[in-house]
Amino acid sequence: MPKLTAKPEPLEVDLAHSAIIVVDMQNAFVSKGGTLDIAGIDLADAPQVVRKIRGVLDAARAAEVPVIYLQMVYKPDLSDSGGAASPNCRKELALHLMEAKPELKGKLLTQGSWDSALVDELAAKPGDLVITKTRYSGFVGTTLDSQLRVRGIQYLFFVGIAANVCVESTLRHAFFLDYWPILVSDSTMAAGGPSALAATIFNVESFFGWTVNSDELSACFAARGD
């Protein structure tokens, strides 16, 4: 098995049992006019993250490593948001914004909205798997775990936005389920700036997994494809 130059230490991975998890690369979290932008969160790093992820995905597909998209989407009536009894409606950003600003209702992270759509630059390709979710962790209320297990996947490479919210939540959950989680550290961006990203990287490297940069990972994929 190839050995990645990962942190906090090198890690052997079996690419035949690996997948890329693309977390929430939607207009909501990447584009001007989306949920994060409306909330006043700096998106300056988003274009670079998109470019990095596109390179990783190109290399993964060439090496026949599965690509799995997670996409945060609510039903138009928000019946899957948890309702008043759930803290999700108080803390999840799109739901909070729609409650605070009635003119946004039905426009943020709801089915069919521009906000909920994957960004054009990272559109899913034939053979990719897209799984919709309604909670920060991609494992909650979805088929993600069963889809991974039926494919024999053990190693998960995480890219996407936001590093400190849905990416980290799903990565931690993967660790609890005995997957091997690896964060591609330059292919993600935090909601809250560099210090928030640094905290996520610290958490991953110290307690929940490993980190690797996109060039190292793409080179590993390319070597498999040769």
Image: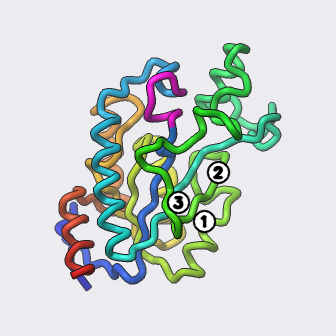
Highlighted magenta segment, given as a residue range: 27-34
Q: CA distance from mark 1 to mark 2?
A: 10 Å
- Dot 1 corresponds to which residue? 144
**Which mark is in front, 2 or 3?**
2
Instruction: Give the number of callouts.
Output: 3
**Which mark is in front, 3 or 1?**
1
Note whether 32 is above or below 211 in the view shown.
Answer: above
- Dot 2 corresponds to which residue? 133
Task: Residue at 73%, 27% (x, y): give it.
Answer: 106
- Dot 3 corresponds to which residue? 173
Task: Residue at 52%, 57% (x, y): give it.
Answer: 69
Q: CA distance from mark 3 to mark 1?
A: 11 Å
Mark 1 or mark 2: name the one nearer the start of the chain.
2
Q: Any magenta on residue 159? A: no
Task: Residue at 52%, 44% (x, y): give it.
Answer: 118
Helix, strand or loop at disc 1? helix
Q: Quadrant of residue 47?
A: top left
Q: Any magenta on residue 28? A: yes
Helix, strand or loop at disc 2? strand
Mark 1 closeness class: few <14, some 14–19, many ≥20 residues within 10 Å: some
The quadrant of the image that shows the N terminus is bottom left
Do the residues bearing badges 1 and 2 touch, measured as CB atoms within 8 Å? yes
Q: Is residue 176 left or right of residue 42?
A: right
Note whether 97 is above or below 10 in the view shown.
Answer: above
Q: Is residue 186 left or right of residue 182?
A: left
